[in-house]
């Protein structure tokens, strides 16, 4: 947040200038907070989503994210699927502001998880479908074998990683969490 230490002496000398500058600082700080671009402190991760619900039939997967949190504008959602409950090579689906995804993936057995993230923040802790993670079978005819996952976000040295959202690279101001 923007702070101007030299404002205090102005309060007695020129109260109108002091009030104007104080309002400008407040406006800049409010805009930074809403946009998630405060250069002095990384934005914290949003609260974890409440749950993810998944249904599957005839090769279609219907994903619904429940998130009753009091979020500010600009919150984005991500869903991930993987063939293992460890999510070692997840396929990332960017949902934007939507909390639903309806996608044809064929006759695959997949585990699902979801999380949210603001631009400029760390991703929230992923929430899996089922505890422990539960696989769903798509059923129906199978489509082509999926290509290898490329992860998401900005990653150093071409690393592929799930649970990364928009990502964080070494030059960014946000330190990456090591566990999800």
Image: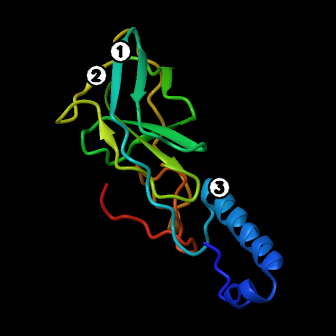
- Image quarter hosting the N terminus: bottom right
Q: Is residue 5 above or below residue 44?
A: below
Residue pointed to by mark 2: 136
Q: Is residue 60 visible?
A: yes
Contact (Cβ within 8 Å) of mark 3 with mark 1:
no
x, y (%) of residue 112? 34, 33
Q: Is residue 53 above or below residue 172?
A: above
- Image quarter hosting the C terminus: bottom left
**What is the CA distance from the residue labelled 3 to the residue labelled 1?**
36 Å
Q: Nearer the viewer, residue 112 or 97?
A: 97
Q: Nearer the viewer, residue 87 or 25?
A: 25
For label 1, the crowd category at 10 Å Cα-Cα, with few meaning under 14, some 14 to 19 and many 20 or more, is: many
x, y (%) of residue 8? 67, 87
Residue pointed to by mark 3: 35
- Kindly report which numbered mark, 3 or 1, lies closer to the viewer in this rendering: 3
Contact (Cβ within 8 Å) of mark 2 with mark 1:
yes
Q: Secondary structure at mark 3?
A: helix
Sequence-wise, the earlier of marks 3 and 1 is 3
**Residue at (72, 84) in percent of width and height:** 11
Q: Is residue 172 above or below residue 106?
A: below
Sequence-wise, the earlier of marks 2 and 1 is 1
x, y (%) of residue 161? 42, 54
Sequence-wise, the earlier of marks 2 and 3 is 3
Residue pointed to by mark 1: 56
For label 3, the crowd category at 10 Å Cα-Cα, with few meaning under 14, some 14 to 19 and many 20 or more, is: some
**Residue at (45, 70) in percent of width and height:** 175
């Amino acid at each position: 947040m923007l702070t101007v230490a030299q404002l205090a002496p102005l309060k007695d000398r020129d109260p109108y200038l002091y009030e104007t500058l104080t309002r400008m600082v407040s406006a800049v700080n409010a805009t930074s907070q809403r946009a998630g671009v405060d250069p002095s402190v990384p934005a914290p991760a949003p609260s974890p989503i409440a749950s993810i619900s998944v249904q599957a039939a005839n090769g279609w997967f219907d994903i619904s994210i429940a998130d009753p949190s009091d979020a500010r504008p600009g919150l984005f959602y991500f869903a991930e699927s993987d063939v293992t409950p460890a999510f070692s090579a997840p396929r990332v689906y960017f949902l934007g502001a939507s909390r639903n995804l309806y996608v044809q993936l064929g006759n695959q057995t997949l585990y699902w998880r979801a999380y949210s993230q603001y631009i400029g923040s760390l991703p929230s802790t992923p929430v899996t479908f089922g505890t422990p993670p539960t696989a769903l079978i798509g059923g129906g005819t199978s489509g082509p074998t999926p290509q290898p996952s490329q992860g998401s976000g900005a990653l150093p040295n071409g690393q592929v990683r799930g649970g990364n959202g928009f990502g964080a690279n070494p030059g960014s101001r946000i330190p990456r969490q090591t566990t999800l």
